[in-house]
Structure formats: C-alpha cells, structure tokens
Image: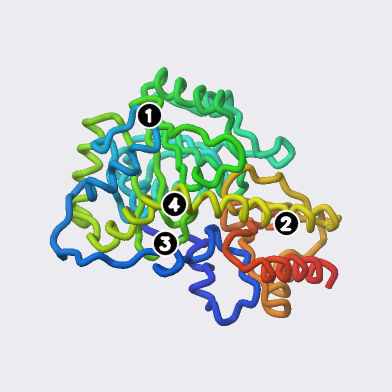
Amino acid sequence: MNYARMVIEKEAPEEYGYDRIRYNLSESSIADQKLSDIGLSLPDLTLFYGEHRGDKELRALIAAQDEGISPDDVLVTAGAAGALFIISTSLLSERDHLVVVRPNYATNIETPKAIGCAISYVDLDFDDGFAIDVARVAAAIRPDTRLISVTCPHNPTGTMMSQADLDALVALAESRQCYLLVDETYRDLSYGTRLPSAASLSPRAISVSSLSKAFGIPGIRIGWLVTRDAALQEKFLAAKEQIGICGSVIDEGIARGMLERRDAFLATLLPDMARRRDIVQAWIDREPLVDWVRPEGGVVGFPRLNVDPGFDLDQFYANLLEHHGTYVGPGHWFDMPKSFFRVGFGWPKEADLRGGLDAISAALRA
C-alpha cells in the first residue's frame, strides 16, 4: 500500500483550527450531536470483545430498513471510511481495474490509488445537472474491471440517481461479472423518494452507510457495509478481524439507541435541512456570480463560481478565510477545478450559514 494523505484531510477544519474559523461551511454532516441532545445515556455495558460482525440488535435495526436484507448481510465497521477501506483492500489489487464516478468522496479514490489498481474516471458535468450517464460507465468497463464505485445521494453535489439508473447499474454489474459499490451515506437525507439500498437489489451490489453524516454522531465511528453475497461477506469479515477484531461495544450501544429513535429523529431533521437548502437557494438566486445544481439529498451542494478566466481563485479562498473567517471546500478537494466549491448547509447554525453565504458574496467583490 502506497499511502498518501488526502488533500481534503490535510486541509480539514480540524487541521486548520476550528477557533480560526467564524463561519464553517466546509462540513459535510449535520451539526454534531451530544448524548443529551438525542435523549441517550450510556447503558451499563460489559466492556468485552464484541461480536465480530457487530452487535446483533444493531445489525437487525440496519437490516430492517430494506426488504430482502438480513442481519447476516450486515457488517458493522469503523465508520463508512472503515467499510470503504475493507471493500477496496478485499476486492482490488494492482492487477484489477476500477471504474469510479467523479467527483467522489476522496477515500473512494485514494485507497484504490494506494493499492495501485488501474482506475478509469467517469466525470460528472455541471451542465448536465451532474447526472450519471450509465452508458459512459458501461463504456469504461474492461475485462479486468472488478468494481464500479458511485455515491448516492452524491457527495459533493447532493444529486441523486433515478431508480431506473440504479437498476441499470445493478444490471451492468451483473452482466459484466463485477461488483457495484454504492456509498449511501446520505440516503436517510433524501428530500424526495428514498431509493432502496443497492445491496437489496442484487448480490453483486454492496451498500455502505454510517451514522456520521445524517445523524451527526461521527465521534462514535459507526458505519456498515451490506452485501447478500455470503462468501464476499466472509472475506470482508476476515479483513475486519485482522484490522481490529471487533468494534467498540460502547459505540455500538450508542448506535443501537440512535437507530431505535431513527424515525422520530429524521422526522424533525429533514424539514429543517430542507429549509436550510432553501436558504442557500435564495442566496444563489440573488448572487449572479454563483450557480449550483439544487441538491436532492444530503446536506452539501457544489456551487460553481461564474467568474472571468483571470479571476484569482487562490486569492479568493485565502481572502474568504483570512478576512471573512469563512471556510468552504474548494474544488481541488475532489479533483475538480477551483471554480467549484462544496458548501455544507447542515452543520452551521442557521445564522452562521447566512453569515457565511454573505461573506462569500463580499469576498467575490473584494
């Protein structure tokens, strides 16, 4: 493995220093929750080695979200990042080929790079609404293709596939005898129709999710992967056991309590996040130098700056942070031009969201 630090992590707000940022619009989750915020308390747990696959009741809660999924199809991991690492290192080698839809969450690209596998990118286009083109994905597949990697709802654009596109990708993986990885971290934050878990549609599909983004508890490091391929699940379990044996029983206990309250939590959260999305939309409607594809899921969008070619983007981002105290995720975090940036509207308080958006307008005119 040829590890290299990801730009998005090197430039993360926790690395820069939260105390140096006034308006943090770079985060990709809802606000961080406290145990008291969500009505949870720590049970009196025995601190033993937990079940290697993850707490049985927790896996049952995850499996119950989709028809055709059983607790045995679920592997609890150290966040979605842990799931993605297990999948890449289990399926890919320097002899394999990956097709990845880009932009994408950095781990979906950087871990395969570290493995040394060949990668073909299918780039999404702003002018096409960042819509996935299944025909282009199919054209990128080679005889040695082992995995197709997509996210839905998409990070960083917030766009979503249609059911027909998801079905077509599943059929493509089945016909080409490769696997389809769908990073579904934002699936519970869908503002319209919530798509089924890809893993529920075929043994060739692998779903990944977590409690970090949509539930605001990244500190407990709970994610999961789902596959109905029993042999593949056994391989993933072997990887988890060799990395860390099992998860934290404390983290899994909190996760179980969170998912038991899932429906009530989301019933309050979704309208609030939809209202915040409308705040960004209203700002964009009155800001001629910024446009976006309106997100259909998640709490991030990927606006584009409509500036002249000579506009100094590096100076803009520096000025935005140093003089306006506002942090966003510039396009190079996602191998995209710096004229794009990711804006997170779920993490800051509403007043801070408005303040940060106004600061972007001020920095554009500086």
**Could you tell whether 122 is left or right of 117 in the image?**
right
Quickly name the residue at label 2: 280
Q: How many marks?
A: 4
**Location of residue 123 with respect to 9 vertically, above or below:** above
Q: Give the numbered dot on residue 281.
A: none
Residue in view at x 46 percent, y 67 percent: 37
x%, y% of residue 42? Answer: 29, 67
**Could you tell whether 135 is left or right of 322 in the image?**
left
x%, y% of residue 328? Answer: 64, 64
Quickly name the residue at label 3: 218
**Could you tell whether 335 is left or right of 82 in the image?**
right
Residue in view at x 37 percent, y 29 percent: 67
Quickly name the residue at label 4: 107
Quickly name the residue at label 1: 67
Separation of residues labelled 2 and 3 (CA atoms): 24 Å
- Say which amino acid is labelled 4: Thr
Q: Nearer the viewer, mark 4 or mark 3?
A: 3
| Residue furthest out toward the top | 175
Residue 48 or residue 178, whichever sits in front? 48
**Location of residue 199 with respect to 345 vertically, above or below:** above
Residue 57 or residue 162, whichever sits in front? 57
Can you see residue 2? no
Q: Residues within 10 Å of mark 4 (few under 14, many from 20)?
A: some
Q: Nearer the viewer, mark 2 or mark 1?
A: 1
Disc 4 vs disc 1: Cβ atoms closer than 8 Å? no
Disc 4 vs disc 3: Cβ atoms closer than 8 Å? no
